[in-house]
Amino acid sequence: QVQLVESGGGLVQPGGSLNVSCTTVGVYVTSYTIAWFRHAPGKEGEFVAVSTWPGGSKGYADSMKGRFTISRDNNKNTMYLRMNFLKGEDTIVYCCAGSRRKGTSKRTTCEYKIWGGGRQVTVSR
């Protein structure tokens, strides 16, 4: 059974950086598409970034380009989201989601069936 185990996040000051990570269990990250979404209470998840297999092609939401970077460590079966220049409006829960289907065009929550538990990111002084 495939699982996604998240870690990272936390509290950071405006302008700072944080990582969140998503480790795959039961599947190699090199055989999986992983996307990051962020969720506000009561709202549909907002697409952040995606990396697809096999080569790790990437895609980003326009509003995240230049600040957020998705990457993977094949040896650790882990996908990372590096968030730089964080702002107050980035305060939200970040979730990773997985699919065996390929493609960086998969940017809606309904295209993913496997989800991590979510990590809170809080940007505040």
Image (spheres, rainbow, N blue to C red):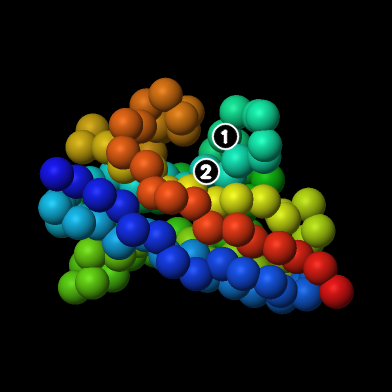
Q: Position of residue 24 (x, y in %)?
A: 25, 57
Q: In percent of the image, x 71 and y 63: which residue is there?
A: 122
Please identify the residue farthest to the right as the structure is shown. 125
- Asked if labels 1 and 2 touch by Cβ distance under 8 angstroms, the answer is yes
Q: Earlier in the sequence, mark 2 or mark 1?
A: 2
Q: Taking 94 as reference, is 64 left or right?
A: right
Residue 3 position within the rendered picture, expressed as x and y whole percent measured from the top left: 25, 49
Measure the alpha-carbon separation of dots 2 and 1: 6 Å
The quadrant in which the C terminus is found is: bottom right
For the residue marked with disc 1, what is the amino acid? Gly
Identify which residue is drawn at 68% across, 71% down: 11
Side of 94 relative to 125 (left or right): left
Residue at horizontal 55%, vertical 39%?
47
Within the image, what quadrant is residue 66 found in?
bottom right
| Residue 48 in view of the camera | no
Query: Circle 2 sits on which residue?
Result: 37
Residue 45: assigned label: 1
